[in-house]
Image: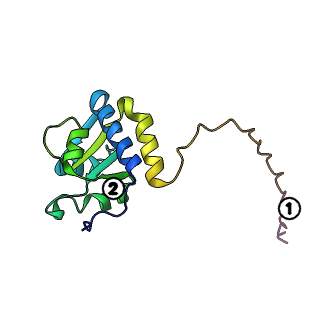
């Protein structure tokens, strides 16, 4: 039975790419492990990607994380089990949630994961466009005000 906090189903290729991204981030970047650390990282706006296990018991441990990520506009995804999530982060124990803070060498993998879960391709560097120079509008001269004569 699906948990109430799991808002979407993640494809197998995205799960594999997420695991790869977590391994790269662990080696060359900074990750935070555990629901409490992830919550702090998201609240402080330091997280660049959050991964939550789909089989956390009790659900209340992580149920707030997707909503918090949405509020802070931080991308998040899911891994099928706590064991897989822990293993992807180089741990020998299960893990409920992980936040990537400093992407390190995982930047490209994380961009790919984010583009797949959001359905939006990562933004390419903008090509230089010819800038249109603003032409100032001529100032409208006011008609001279009628001068009242004292007489």
Image point 52% across, 44% down: which residue? Answer: 122
Image point 23% across, 52% down: which residue? Answer: 81
In-image side of 56 versus 77 (left or right)? left
Q: Answer whether residue 93 is magenta in the image.
A: no
Q: Quadrant of the N terminus?
A: bottom left
Q: Which residues are magenta?
A: 141-151
Image point 54% across, 47% down: which residue? Answer: 121
Residue 24 in the image: state x and y as whole percent.
33, 32
Most frequent secondary structure within the magenta stretch: loop
Which of the labelled discs sits on residue 69, or is there none?
2
Q: Is residue 70 visible?
A: yes
Question: Which circle, 2 or 1, is nearer the viewer?
Answer: 2
**Separation of marks 2 and 1 at Cα, in angstroms:** 61 Å
Quadrant position of residue 113:
top left
Label 2 crowd (10 A; few <14 / some 14-19 / many >=20) = many
* Callout 2: SS: helix
In-image side of 120 versus 28 (left or right)? right
Q: Quadrant of the C terminus?
A: bottom right
Can you identify the residue that label 1 sits on?
Answer: 144
- As displayed, is residue 90 above or below residue 122? above
Residue at the extreme bottom of the image, as rendered: 151
């Amino acid at each position: 039975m699906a948990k109430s906090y799991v808002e979407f189903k993640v494809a197998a290729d995205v799960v594999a790419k997420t695991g790869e991204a977590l391994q790269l981030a662990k080696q060359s970047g900074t990750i935070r492990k555990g629901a409490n650390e992830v919550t702090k990282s998201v609240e402080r706006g330091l997280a660049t990607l959050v991964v939550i296990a789909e089989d956390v018991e009790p659900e209340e441990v992580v149920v707030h994380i997707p909503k918090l990520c949405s509020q802070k506009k931080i991308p998040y995804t899911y891994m099928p089990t706590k064991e897989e999530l822990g293993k992807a982060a180089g741990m020998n124990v299960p893990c409920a949630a992980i936040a990537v803070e400093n992407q390190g060498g995982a930047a490209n993998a994380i961009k790919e994961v984010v583009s797949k879960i959001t359905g939006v391709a990562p933004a390419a560097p903008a090509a230089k466009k010819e800038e249109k120079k603003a032409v100032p509008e001529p100032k409208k001269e006011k008609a001279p005000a009628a001068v009242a004569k004292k007489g």
